[in-house]
Amino acid sequence: MEDILKIAAENPIIPVVKLERAEDARALCKGGICCMEITFRTAAAKDAIKKVAEEVPEMLVGAGTVIGAGQVEDAVEAGAKFIVSPGLSEEVVKKCQELDVICL
């Protein structure tokens, strides 16, 4: 599991994005922002995370607005390195612990 303090120290700006094109992630990296949170507010979130994780490996990608264990599984399977939940959800935290992924 990556250390959250290390992630925060290396990435003082972590944009929250709705992303459907890996090219947009590549452009962010070229601009010096190599960490992003893709929200699970759209049906395209899992595919977007997978596309960025595969096509832009220099981007540290996480999943946001995660509200259930199923979304944690989907996000991690797609390549998310951290999970952000809009509130404290024991279900989300337990699944993150089980999968050894950072949960915020």
Image (cartoon, grey):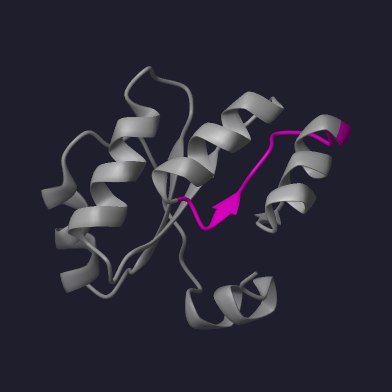
Res 66 quadrant in image: top right
Give 2 or 41, whichever is nearer the viewer.
2
Q: Which residue is drawn at 30% across and 32% down?
A: 47
Give 89 or 17, whichever is nearer the viewer.
89
Res 90 quadrant in image: top right
Which secondary structure is most common in the magenta stretch? loop
In the displayed structure, does residue 68 sit left or right of residue 2? right
In the displayed structure, does residue 66 sit left or right of residue 38? right
Question: Does the stretch in magenta take in 74?
Answer: no
Q: Position of residue 73 (x, y in %)?
A: 58, 35
Depicted 92 relative to depicted 67: above or below: below
Residue 65 is at least partly visible in this image: no
Question: Does the stretch in magenta take in 81?
Answer: yes
Q: Position of residue 104 (x, y in %)?
A: 71, 51
Give 26 or 52, whichever is nearer the viewer.
52
Q: Which residue is drawn at 27% across and 66% down?
A: 57
- Report the quarter where the N terminus lies: bottom right
